[in-house]
Amino acid sequence: MPTRASLLLPIVMVVLAACGGDHPMSTLDAHSDLTREINHIYGRIFWWTGLLFLLVQGGLIYTVLRFRAKGNETTNPEQVHGNLKLELTWTILPIFILLHIAIPTVSVIFKSQAPATEEGKVTINALGEQWWFAFEYPELGVVTANEMHVPLGKEVEIRLQSDNVIHSFWVPQLAAKRDMVPGRVNQIKFKAEKLGEFYGQCAEYCGDSHALMKLRVVVDTPEDFAKWVEAQKAPAESESATAQAGFQAFQGAGCVACHAINGTTAAAVIGPDLTHVGSRTTIASGILENTEENLKTWIKDPPGVKPGSKMPNLNLSDEQVASIAAYLQTLK
Ligand code: CUA
């Protein structure tokens, strides 16, 4: 038989685990206007429901203690039918509490999906794929995957779409969570308030590698963001011997059937755009650090790294793999 203390232990541990440390996926650390407002509503709901909990439980405990049978009492309590005052109170009071929660909630939902209008806004089309994210900046002419850059303090409007199954775009500290639904465009808007790298994850079960469908949002100063845009718009490096041999291997292996590399003949849009894949911090949708060794592991056997990966194992030789990996690393 477990003792009462041992039953409490897991609860205490969970509570303690929430204290301190770095929690990049914690929704409680808000770093955008949107997530701050959501946390504000969260706090409001927490305190109102906490108050109700105390009132209801307090009344219950009081009643149990005050009116419990004492000794061998046999008299039946007085039978009552209804109490108008009490019933009005517990109908009207919750209406006010629910309105107090509903009005700010609905207003933040509307605000979060309104189009961006301010000077310096950035629009991004985000497409959920199995299992990675495609990002396109239509006004800036940038296409990338799995890592989006945004400028600090500027409105970012993301148009969320999918052409396969439902995914959910979730960046807890910046962009909250919103579904990517085939056949419709959902919008989410936020202004980042802190520089740095923020983690995201697909939050709707979408198949084999749902859990491995990650993303990152890098918040840059507006100057660094402009530099990043310039670098992304430039065509891929193609002068060096590594690049030339690498592109030959890339083409020979059939990679051009799915991927685009600007400035080369590769222009397919089935897999992620690789024009500047070397500039990303991770590969395979955020699950491996972007190193030459990891690239080799990934190219050699994609479904081995990511179950169900649409990039097949092409049975490439070690030479082909090495040449392609070295080439992709040059695409900064
Ligand atoms: Cu995409 Cu889960």
Image: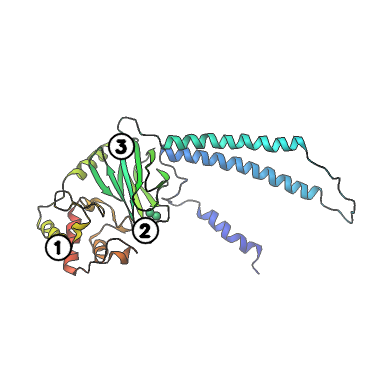
Residue 214 percent across, percent down from the top left: 36, 54
Mark 1 belongs to which amino acid?
Gly
Query: Which residue is at 80% across, 47% downward?
Result: 66
Residue where numbered disc 3 is placed = 122
* Callouts 1 and 2 close, C-beta under 8 Å: no
Label disc, if present, on residue 212 of the rendered structure: 2
Q: Nearer the viewer, mark 1 or mark 2?
A: 1
Mark 1 crowdedness (10 Å alpha carbons): few <14, some 14-19, many ≥20: few
* Looking at the image, residue 233 lies above or below residue 165: above
State the CA–CA distance, disc 3 to disc 1: 38 Å
* Residue depicted at x 27% and y 44%: 136
- Residue at position x 39%, y 57% from top? 210
Quarter placement of the N terminus: bottom right
Determine whether the beta carbon of the residue marked 1 sits less than 8 angstroms from the nearest atom of ligand 1: no
Front residue of this view, candidates 62 and 314: 314
Image-based side of 260 in relation to 25, left or right: left
Secondary structure found at label 3 = strand
Residue 312 versus residue 119: which sits nearer the camera? Answer: 312
Q: Earlier in the sequence, mark 3 or mark 1?
A: 3
Give residue 218's quadrant in the image. Answer: top left
Give me the disc on residue 252: 1
Q: Element type at marker 2?
A: helix
Does the Cβ of the disc 2 residue fall within 8 Å of ligand 1? no
Number of residue marks: 3
Q: Position of residue 262 (x, y in %)?
A: 17, 49
Crowding at dot 3, Cα within 10 Å, few <14 / some 14-19 / many 20+, comes out as many
Packing grade of label 2 (10 A; few <14, some 14-19, many >=20) is some
**Mark 1, secondary structure of its residue:** helix
